[in-house]
């Protein structure tokens, strides 16, 4: 069984490995020389990627890969609508938000129209880390408290404050004194018949601990599909009791939509909509510009006002620039014009049914869960719920050798993380099923 501290390393390329391909070896040497110790590459044999389109990526050697890994190009790799919008705007104007620029206002209005009433203001930033960092500052300013509650393997960014609430990014899972971690609402291994109720009870305990030590509870921040914890999408209402407890304690609910947002779950534009609880703030990132760096925080106006009165406002040189607005508008337009929310729902149903058909007494697939184009496949010892990280690694690399890219997640690194672009279709699903059946049969 993989220990939690080893999960980050599970699918990482071992740089001491010998690489026979001279072209790949040269690319690896360039990477190591420039990126040094910060270089992280995936798979037993890394991929030298050259181009991508739709659901497919192509390596420098011409090998094509079906991408079920990246949630960044949510409407499809190299989408022409985004490329055209960025190019057109770059030829006209790109500057900061100290000026009145129509396309930036157009984007803000269109984005906020996708949110329920009450979430009426947006602050545009450049990365998900910046968005979550700002949301934490806003929560502290509004509540006068500092305590934050996150799940055991949460990842919310790589700034100092967001690393502090990201135990999943630290090998020892340590967090500072003002942060409490709680186990996610998991049911497969625990057999819990009420994962949402148990989750709420754990959150109440965390609130009591924060209050006893004088931190108070400023916020709970939740990735509403629990992607780093192992992918837990249901049942609907999973987080409602926990959010109610935080609100009763005077804290705020921050919904981190970097992973489940922008139609990925197939149920609604936002992952939090699967549950009844209304966020006080929502943070967004990667899929927002289909790969163009942009992110944001949508907030209740009173929360944003309290922060601005205390901190004299917020300014980000590149946040909300006209190029980002153009890319973001193209994403929103394409989700609607190409019916990608509906397609995500249909694709998810197809994948769920196909994967569950591979389950059985001798299968390594212990559980299939998720929503829309975000699934988690639990790889377990056949006939049990015991996680099998070694088999998960075998499946990941076996799929890669057959031209299909997936990732791993969860406390034991045994959950396949499947996130195809929202344009993913039945033909691609059949390619995936064929590769999966071959790997499981080995």
Image (cartoon, helix red, strand yellow):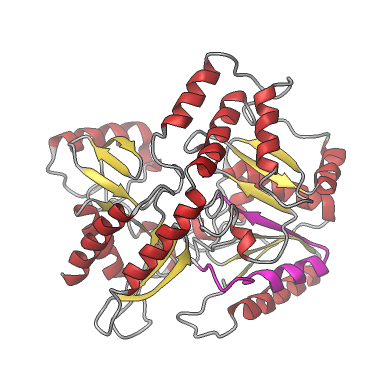
Write down the quadrant of residue 430 in the picture.
bottom left
Residue at position x 54%, y 51% in the image: 263
Q: Nearer the viewer, residue 189 or 45?
A: 189
Quadrant location of the N terminus? Answer: bottom left
Residue 239 part of the magenta-drawn span: yes
Q: Position of residue 98 (x, y in %)?
A: 73, 22
Q: Position of residue 172 (x, y in %)?
A: 50, 63
Residue at position x 45%, y 48% in the image: 71
Q: Is 261 on the left-hand or right-hand side of 438? A: right
Q: Position of residue 246 (x, y in %)?
A: 76, 67
Q: Nearer the viewer, residue 228 or 340?
A: 340
Task: Evaluate whether residue 6 shows in this view.
Answer: no
Q: Which residues are magenta?
A: 232-258
Q: Position of residue 408 (x, y in %)?
A: 38, 60
Residue 370 part of the magenta-drawn span: no
Write down the quadrant of residue 19 in the picture.
top left
Quadrant location of the C terminus? Answer: bottom left
Is residue 123 shown above or below 217? above
């Amino acid at each position: 069984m993989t220990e939690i501290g080893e999960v980050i390393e599970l699918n990482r390329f071992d740089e001491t490995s010998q690489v026979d391909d001279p072209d790949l070896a040269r690319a690896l040497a360039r990477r190591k020389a420039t990126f040094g110790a910060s270089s992280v590459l995936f798979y037993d044999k890394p991929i030298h990627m050259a181009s991508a389109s739709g659901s497919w990526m192509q390596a420098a050697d011409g090998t094509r890969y079906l991408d079920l890994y990246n949630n960044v190009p949510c409407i499809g790799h190299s989408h022409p609508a985004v490329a055209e919008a960025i190019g057109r705007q770059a030829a006209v104007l790109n500057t900061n938000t100290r000026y009145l620029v129509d396309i930036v206002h157009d984007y803000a209005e269109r984005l906020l129209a996708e949110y329920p009433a009450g979430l009426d203001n947006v602050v545009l930033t450049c990365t998900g880390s910046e968005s979550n960092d700002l949301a934490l500052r806003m929560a502290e300013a509004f509540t006068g408290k500092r305590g934050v509650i996150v799940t055991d393997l949460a990842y919310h960014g790589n700034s100092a404050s967001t690393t502090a609430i990201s135990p999943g990014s630290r090998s020892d899972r340590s967090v500072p004194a003002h942060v409490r971690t709680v186990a996610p609402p998991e049911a497969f291994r625990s057999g819990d018949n009420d994962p949402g109720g148990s989750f709420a009870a754990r959150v109440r305990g965390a609130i009591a601990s924060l209050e006893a030590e004088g931190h108070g509870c400023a916020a709970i921040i939740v990735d509403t599909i629990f992607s780093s914890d192992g992918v837990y999408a249901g049942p609907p209402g999973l987080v409602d009791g926990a959010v109610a407890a935080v609100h009763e304690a005077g804290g705020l609910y921050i919904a981190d939509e970097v992973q489940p947002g922008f139609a990925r779950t197939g149920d609604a534009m936002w992952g939090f909509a699967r549950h009844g609880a209304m966020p006080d703030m929502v943070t967004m990132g990667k899929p927002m510009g289909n790969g163009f760096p942009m992110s944001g925080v949508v907030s209740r106006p009173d929360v944003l006002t309290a922060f601005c009165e205390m901190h004299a406002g917020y300014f980000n040189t590149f946040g909300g620039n006209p190029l980002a607005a153009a890319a973001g508008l193209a994403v929103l337009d394409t989700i609607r014009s190409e019916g990608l929310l509906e397609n995500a729902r249909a694709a998810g149903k197809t994948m769920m049914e196909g994967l569950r058909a591979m389950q059985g007494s001798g299968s390594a697939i212990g559980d299939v869960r998720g929503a829309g184009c975000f699934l988690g496949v639990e790889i377990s010892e056949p006939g049990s719920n015991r996680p099998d990280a070694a088999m998960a690694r075998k499946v990941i690399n076996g799929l890669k050798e057959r031209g299909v890219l997936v990732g791993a997640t969860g406390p034991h690194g045994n959950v396949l993380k499947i996130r195809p672009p929202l344009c993913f279709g039945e033909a691609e699903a059949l390619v995936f099923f064929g590769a999966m059946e071959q790997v499981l049969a080995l």
